[in-house]
Image: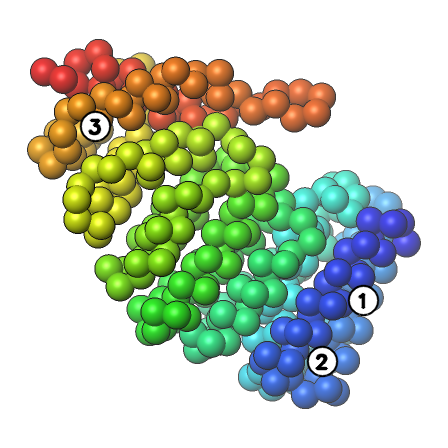
Amino acid sequence: MDSQYENFIKEDSKNSLVLMQNLNVPDFEYGKIEQWFSEYLVCHAKSDDFNMSVIYENELQKKYDELAPITGESASKYMIGKLITYINITDSGYLRSTLIARLSVLLQELLKDYIETQKICFSPLEFLSITEYTKNCFFVSPNGELLENLLKIEKSNKICANANTEQRERILKNMLSVIAQKEYHHDIQCFKKILNLITKDDETLVAHIKNYCVNNRQGCYTYINIIMNRSLSADTWDDFILKKEAVTLFDTAKGAHPKDSWLNKYRELQKRLELNNILWICTQISERENLKNYAFTNYTWSDDVAKRFLKSAQWIQEFGTA
């Protein structure tokens, strides 16, 4: 195997052992699952074309069908954590070209079965263990849907609603850590969903969000940081709610001219925000227009989220003060 595989296996093996212990997975089931994922990586490394990947997909499906009956509830939860991580690394292009997509489809279908058909249930403590494992993911792909899959489990189990304050804080901080590691952010949907899971009791999380930034310093999160660091209300919780609503508003500017839906959102927010605060945010964003594009090593990508924030700032400055 290439060094990329060896690096991933080394890190994942260490993290997987911790997850296995936290979920109390029996040694026998743990060994069988690890063997299946090891075989998956071998097939992934050897797949040279679409036809070959289909052959390997069928082989892996057959071996999984033999494995599935012997796995208990804790092993199924362990399998879910592994699938989330392996989907992420497979779709990242880190190991090799994503053109051999059939093997990724197999993982996605297995995960879908666990979440949507079998409806495997997690306690807050078990889900915390999954987020601890994924937080240490070797490489967070922009296309691996790691956060999206975690949020599906959270939603179906109402994890944060049933968690205590300490559990919720650790879970959401772990998920924010994953966002921070992401190579590129096509959108901020997962970030906004995490904001909506924070409650009035989560004072530490509210403070954490104020200083939150992502590792690649992408423009859209720089703009979010500007909003989060402006004092909008003397009341801590009201201040957070206003900032959350402002982030949503700035992320919804689409088209050449503001639509009625956007204008209505802005007018509702304007009723509760001092004009000088709104204009200060708009000025700070507009002065950083150069962040609308994100520079990689050899090329540049358009940061569409940042462009929506810039457009919102422009609309507010042009006519939103009336």
Residue shown at 82% from the left, 49% from the top: 4
Residue shown at 61% from the left, 85% from the top: 24
Instruction: Say what secondary structure mark 2 lies in.
Output: helix
Classify residue 78 as left or right of residue 268: right
Residue 271: % across, % down: 9, 33
Q: Quadrant of residue 242?
A: top left
Residue 110: % across, % down: 61, 65
Instruction: Say what secondary structure mark 3 lies in.
Output: helix
Sequence-first disc among 3 and 2: 2
How much space separates mark 2 and mark 1, taking CA atoms? 12 Å
Q: Amino acid at mark 2?
A: Tyr
Q: Nearer the viewer's eye, disc 3 or disc 2?
A: 3
Residue topped by disc 2: 30
Can residue 91 be seen in this snapshot? no
Residue 25: % across, % down: 64, 84
Q: Are marks 3 and 2 in contact (CB under 8 Å)?
A: no
Residue topped by disc 1: 38
Q: Amino acid at mark 3?
A: Asn
Can residue 317 be seen in this snapshot? yes
Above or below, 197 relative to 288: below
How much space separates mark 1 and mark 3, taking CA atoms? 54 Å
Residue topped by disc 3: 277
Q: Are marks 2 and 1 in contact (CB under 8 Å)?
A: no
Sequence-first disc among 1 and 3: 1
Mark 1 surroundings: few (<14), some (14-19) or many (≥20) residues within 10 A: few
Residue 284: % across, % down: 35, 21
Sequence-first disc among 2 and 1: 2
Q: Amino acid at mark 1?
A: Ser
